[in-house]
Amino acid sequence: MKARAYGQFCGLARAIEVVGERWAVLIVRDLLVGPKRFTDLHRGLPKIPTNVLASRLKQLEGAGVVRRRLLPRPESSVIYELTEYGMELEDVLIRLGRWGAKLLDVPGPDEIITVDSMVMALRSTFRAEYARGLHAGYELHFGDIVIHALVSDGKLEASAGPLPAPDLIIEAGPGIKDLMAGEIDANEAIEKGIVQLTGDASLLTRFAQMFRIDPMPAETPHS
Amino acid sequence: MKARAYGQFCGLARAIEVVGERWAVLIVRDLLVGPKRFTDLHRGLPKIPTNVLASRLKQLEGAGVVRRRLLPRPESSVIYELTEYGMELEDVLIRLGRWGAKLLDVPGPDEIITVDSMVMALRSTFRAEYARGLHAGYELHFGDIVIHALVSDGKLEASAGPLPAPDLIIEAGPGIKDLMAGEIDANEAIEKGIVQLTGDASLLTRFAQMFRIDPMPAETPHS
DNA sequence: CTGGATCCCTCACGATACTG
DNA sequence: CAGTATCGTGAGGGATCCAG
C-alpha cells in the first residue's frame, strides 16, 4: 500500500493507485455489465491468475469500488458487484475504451472476444446524437457471443444475451470494425459477407452511424 | 510487448496496454500542461526511476501518444510533447482525476504537490455551469507553487505560473480541499486561515462553486 | 548541466497445483 | 465453486555512471 503509492497529492494519482494496477479496470469493465461470481469473472478474463484476481477484488473492495455479497439461500454463493462509487467509473471507462478502440485493427489469433467487452464496446462507441428519434432493438452475434442494443431516442441500453423481438439481428465477422470505422458502408459489408442480417436490413446503416469508431488523428509532421 | 498484452480484442484493454502501466498516466498528465524536457518530467515525478521514465517515454512514443522533438539551435535540447492523439486523453484524465479526488483528504507527509498536478486538479474540478457570465483571473499559491485560472464565461484556461493582473490571489494551505468539497464555506476558510486573499475577496465564494469536489456517494448497506 | 544508460535488488505478477 | 499456497520470472525501484 505504501510502497506502491505515487507520493503525489493528486486526484488522478489516487485514482490510478486504486484502479491502475494490472487487470483492475478490466475487472471493473466486466462488473459494469453486471454483478458476477468469482468464476464468472475468471471466465471473462481467462488470462488472469486466480490469485491475482482474488487480490484485486480485495483491493477494490477495500477502496470502496467493489462490494462482496453473499447470495441468500439456496444459492449461498458469493457475488461481486460495483458500489455506487465504482459505477461512477462507467463514464470514464467508456471514454477510455473509445480512445483505445482507434488502435484496434483485426482480432489477433490469441485475442479473445467476450460478452462483457462487446457490451462495453457498444456503450463506448455509441453516439447519442445519431440516435435521435430512433427506436430499435439490435441483436448482435459474434461467433457464439450474443448481446443486444436497445436504442430509444438517444438512449442506449446495451447488455448481454438475446432480445425477445429484435428489429435486426446482425451476425458479425471479424471485419465489423471496418464498418464501424466508416471504412466501408453498409452495402459493402453485406456484399463482402462481413455481416449477415435477419430483419430490417435498412437499420444497418443507422447502426454504423450510431456505433462509430473515429479514426486516429493524422500525425502532424514536426518541422 | 506480447507477454504484457491482455489478450482481449477490446478498446479498453488496448488503451490500458498503452497508458495503463505504472507512471504512464502521470507522465501524460504533466505533458497535458505543456511540453517538457526529460529533466523537467523527472522533477515533477521525482519518485520515478530514470530508466522507467525513459522506458515509458519510448513506449508512449511508439504508441503515438508522445512525440520526441529536438529543439532548434542554440537550445539543441530534447523535448517531449503529446501528439494530437495523446491530447485526446485530456478529457478522460480530467474525469478520472475528478473521480479520484473524492478519495483525497489531507496531503500526507510524503506526498508532494506539483505545479502540473495542481493545474490538472483545477481542470478536473471545474464546473462550467457555475462559471457562466463570469470573467475573472485567479492566481493560486500553494507554498511556492504558483498557478493560475482564467475563467471567461464557462471556459477555463488553467496553467502554470502567475497572472499579469489577477482579480484575486489565493494563498492556500493544506485544508483547501475542505473548501472545494463544500465542507466549509468561504468565510470559514478565511477565518480559519486556510486561505489568505489579495484582491477581490468576494470572488472566493464563486471559486468554491466553480472548482468543486463532490463527496463520496453514501455506501448503500446491503441487506 | 542535460539526457539518459547500466547495475543490482526486490517484489508484484504469472503459472501451476492444491484445498474447503 | 471459490479461492489459497508455492515458486519462478521479469518489471519496477534506487543508486550510480557516462556521453554530449
Image (cartoon, coloured by chain):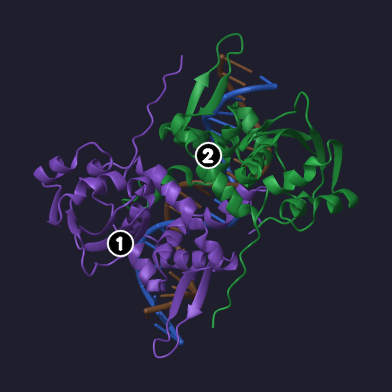
Chain colours: A purple, B green, C blue, D brown
Up the image or down, A24 lies above or below A223; here it is below
Q: Amino acid at mark 2?
A: Glu
Residue A25, given in percent of the width and then of the height, sits at 46, 56
Please report, as a chain letter, where disc 2 is located. B
Which residue is disc 2 drawn over? B90
Q: Residues within 10 Å of mark 1 (few under 14, many from 20)?
A: many
> Which residue corresponds to the image point at 50% horizontal and 62% vertical from the top-left?
A87
The quarter of the rendered structure image containing the N terminus of chain A is bottom right
Label 1 secondary element: helix
Please report, as a chain letter, where disc 1 is located. A
- Would residue A197 be found to the left or right of residue B152 on screen? left
- Would residue A42 be found to the left or right of residue A191 on screen? right
Marks 1 and 2, how far apart at CA? 29 Å
Is A34 or A7 nearer to us in this picture?
A34
Residue B148, given in percent of the width and then of the height, sits at 72, 33
Is B150 or B18 nearer to us in this picture?
B150
Q: Amino acid at mark 1?
A: Val
What mark, if any, has residue A182 been given in the picture? none
Which residue is disc 1 drawn over? A115
The picture quadrant where one finds residue A149 is bottom left
Q: Residues within 10 Å of mark 2 (few under 14, many from 20)?
A: some
Residue B144 showing in the rendered view: no
Is B112 or A122 nearer to us in this picture?
A122
> Which residue corresponds to the image point at 34% horizontal and 38% vertical from the top-left?
A214
Residue B153, given in percent of the width and then of the height, sits at 63, 35
